[in-house]
Image (tube, rainbow, N blue to C red):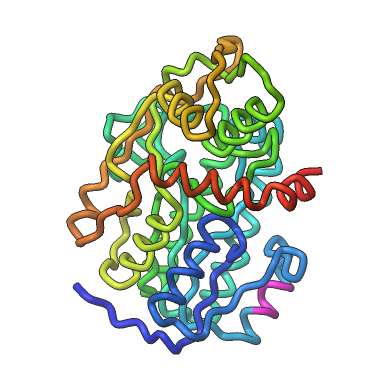
Amino acid sequence: MTITMDPQAVCYVAGHRGLVGSALWRNLKNAGFTSLIGESSADLDLRNRDEVFTYMSHHRPRYVILAAAKVGGILANSTSPVDFLSDNLRIQLNVMDAAVALRVERLLFLGSSCIYPKFAPQPIPESALMSGYLEPSNEAYAVAKIAGITAVNAARKQYGLPWISAMPTNLYGTGDNFTQGKSHVLPALISRYHDAVFQGLDEVVNWGTGTPRREFLHADDAASACIHLLEHYDGESPVNIGSGTDLSIKELAELVATTVGYTGTTSWDVQKPDGTPQKLLDTSLVTSLGWRPRITLEDGIATTYQWFRENLGALRTRAS
């Protein structure tokens, strides 16, 4: 199926300054969309219901992509579960309730692969949702994202709105969050090994055993997949977005070390949590719709590291 979207219609990208939101903005502009709107969190607090309804009522978007979220790695999720649950639930419901009130024509909700059970079959099909217990370290975030999927399907059922949900794997790329203690595994490794090189350290210590396997997808590939889904999919099932391949955290660390030029040793703090043993998505649904990723992990890490180095001063300012 093909869904014709008007590139001149108002399209609201919630979270347009984040990793995937900024990639969506770039890709939509490249696709010819001329009426994109978005606000920084300083100008529009999506946790504030009145602010969201006022903004949406004023701009009346025809399309909404909900990429805004409070995100973080294992440490952040483990130590601040109240924040991850409360902030994400409010962001999602405020934006979607306002979109329902306006009967927004197309909405894409961007979820996360952490919605799936800790011991889901590998690769993980969309049907695995709600089939087992979640990974405890990010349970609050996962529950919020599951609620988002439910809200999308509620709007489909009650109002007949052709809204959809996309579940990306671990994303990375230019514009990622490299803040110590708050970043995901790949940007954390880039920052850690970079610091080791420039501080002359002969050892880097990483969390866990290094054995868990993870799948990674560049944010620009994720953005292109979301746009493809908006133009080719209308169904209740969330759609997995991934690269289709995974590697161990140890292998990832070695790849990052090579990219940044680190030649010292790497050790592992096995007292720290590993998280889910493996998380590889079954991407047969999205590939059946005609989408494929373009950016290899090696190339993606190289360009991400280049961006990191070019923006290091600004990144350190934001982190302080």
**Is residue 121 in view?**
yes
**Residue 297 x/y as whole percent:** 38, 41
For residue 257: magenta? no
- Name the residue nearer the viewer: 73 or 137: 73
**Residue 281 x/y as whole percent:** 32, 40
- Name the residue nearer the viewer: 174 or 194: 194
Relative horizontal placement of residue 33, taking residue 192 as reference (left or right): left
Where 161 falls versus 130 (above or below)?
A: below
Magenta region, main secondary structure: helix
Image quarter hosting the C terminus: top right
Q: Identify the residue at image location x=32%, y=59%.
A: 236
**Residue 159 x/y as whole percent:** 41, 75
Image quarter hosting the N terminus: bottom left
**Residue 193 x/y as whole percent:** 59, 28
**Is residue 146 in view?**
no
Relative horizontal placement of residue 146, taking residue 232 as reference (left or right): right
Q: Identify the residue at image location x=40%, y=24%.
A: 251
Q: Which residues are magenta?
A: 51-55
Q: Identify the residue at image location x=60%, y=10%.
A: 271
